[in-house]
Image (spheres, rainbow, N blue to C red):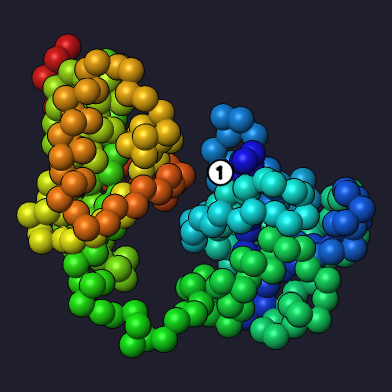
Amino acid sequence: MKQRVVVQAIVKNGDAVLLLRRSQGRPGLIGKYELPGGTLDNGEQPDDSLKRHLKANLGVGVDGLRLADAMSIVSREEGDIQHIFIIYDVDISQVHGEIRLGQSYDRYTWTHAGEVDQIPVRDSAGEILGVYGQADLPQRKQVSKPHKEHTAADALHAIIYSDGGSRGNPGLSAAAYVIMNSNQVVIDQGSLYLGITTNNQAEYHGVRIGLERALALGMHTVELRIDSMLVVNQLKGVYKVKNRDLWPINERITTLLSQFERVKFTHVPRELNQLADSLVNKQLDEYKGEIK
């Protein structure tokens, strides 16, 4: 399945959200409303990409962007393509300049709660707004009963964000993890200086120390959220581990994984792994003077 990364802005004015109507593009999209944003170019940072699209399509600049979430949606409009949406929350007070629509749009509207179903909306916009809900953006809309949200099993489930980095590759390296419970509350975090290793080794060690800590905390099930697609696919068994230096760490992780009742691997954008990343950089900053 092909993947495409798209940045989207939920621009709010009170409890209303900005939508743009397409005047160009594929026939199935013309006349439909969508959230501001667009496709991420190769090597482009998501926040820079969104600022570029807002300037091109709305004629406005924006002061500060707050990352809200990332979602994966398989588009029914474009066939078998998985879209990774990186979503930013933007208040109208952060926008400067007068709205001047680019050539791809002919109209914009501010929609309130309950109005989205009354206008033709692009599938992706409908999905995103359906998850968040209009009234209390950017908080996710609760879709399950509260009594089912807090069970004994949830208390034994860990969400582990792990990361690793090497300054030099190989070079000074560190690994880190952040463990959250089912309600996305941080319950533990840590980092480890590794000495001289590669980026991939550091990424693996981040997974290792996160799993070791989850076991020490008595967790029964884990979801690992990792920003390295290579590591995710190797741990899933999609890719073979060809680097001999990774074999011992991979075997240790395999042993650790066997001690959990259930394990899930999820690839996340680097922007959603900032806490673990900051722990890695903090650890490296402390040791940067060790080797000249």
Residue in the foreground of this view, choosing between 29 and 232: 232
One can see residue 279 in this view: no
User: Is residue 29 something that shows in the picture?
Assistant: yes
Q: What residue lies at 11% left-to-right and 19% top-to-bottom?
A: 290
Residue 202 vertical position relative to residue 162 in the rendered view, above or below:
above
Question: Which quadrant is home to the N terminus?
Answer: top right
Q: Residue at x 34, y 79 (%)?
A: 149
Q: Nearer the viewer, residue 30 or 217?
A: 217
Q: List the residue tagged with mark 1.
A: 46
Question: Residue 46, image x and y in percent?
Answer: 56, 43
Residue 163 location in percent, x, y? Answer: 29, 39
Sort mark 1 into few (<14), some (14-19) or many (20+) by Cα contacts within 10 Å.
many
Question: Which quarter of the figure has residue 221?
Answer: bottom left
Relative height, residue 287 to residue 61 (above, below): above
For the C terminus, give its image quadrant: top left
Image x and y of residue 284, in percent? 20, 31
Question: At numbered mark 1, what does the secondary structure look like: helix, strand or loop?
Answer: helix
Q: Seen in the image, is 248 located left or right of residue 79?
A: left
Q: Is residue 286 left or right of residue 169?
A: left
Percent across and percent down for residue 252 are: 15, 34
Which amino acid is tagged 1?
A: Pro
| 83 displayed left or right of 224 | right
Name the residue nearer the viewer: 225 or 55: 225
* Residue in view at x 48 percent, y 73 percent: 139
Along the horizontal axis of the image, is 115 left or right of 8?
Answer: right
Query: Which residue is depicted at the point 61% across and 66% down?
Result: 128
